[in-house]
Amino acid sequence: MPAWTTWVKWNGTIEQTLIDGHHQVAGEATIAEARKAMAKKGQPSLLDVVTLTDKPFLGQCWVLSHAELHQHFGSKQPPRAAIEAGCASFIAKLDPAQSVAITAYTKGVPTAVMFAHKA
């Protein structure tokens, strides 16, 4: 079971989408203030994701390639519904403390990213 999942609207690049996600989670607080508040509560969140990678490494967020999307979600450009339907079983296979970014598509265009973390 994931410790958390967060959907973020695609914004041109995975890096910019992550930044947008940080602001989404932080709300009215600054990113630094929100990270500090979450750390005090012991609540992991998207704010803990700072490094993106193309391979599964602990402490970094693995961004699935088109081939990996096809392998795990049945399409190189899976729609959000396919990701939501298969994410629980996929995340269950991850190592504890591993984060992942899964891009959803509509008509071949990226539209959102699910960031998730396994406890």
Image (spheres, rainbow, N blue to C red):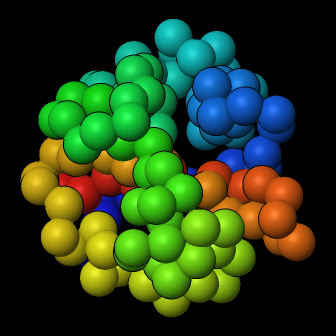
Residue shown at 51%/83% (left/top)? 74
Rendered view: 25 above or below 93: above
Residue shown at 32%/52% (left/top)? 117
Give the x, y percent position of residue 12.
Answer: 82, 34
Rendered view: 80 above or below 8: below
Q: Quadrant of the N terminus?
A: bottom left
Query: In the shown orientation, is residue 2 left or right of residue 97?
Result: right
Q: Quadrant of the C terminus?
A: bottom left
Residue shown at 29%/68% (left/top)? 91
Query: In the shown orientation, is residue 112 left or right of residue 47?
Result: right
Residue 48, image quadrant: top left
Rendered view: 60 above or below 33: below
Observer-nearest residue: 32 or 8? 8
Observer-nearest residue: 40 or 12? 12
Residue shown at 84%/58% (left/top)? 109
Observer-nearest residue: 71 or 19? 71
Give the x, y percent position of residue 50.
Answer: 42, 21
Give the x, y percent position of residue 17.
Answer: 69, 35
Give the x, y percent position of residue 46.
Answer: 47, 39
The extreme left residue here reads 96
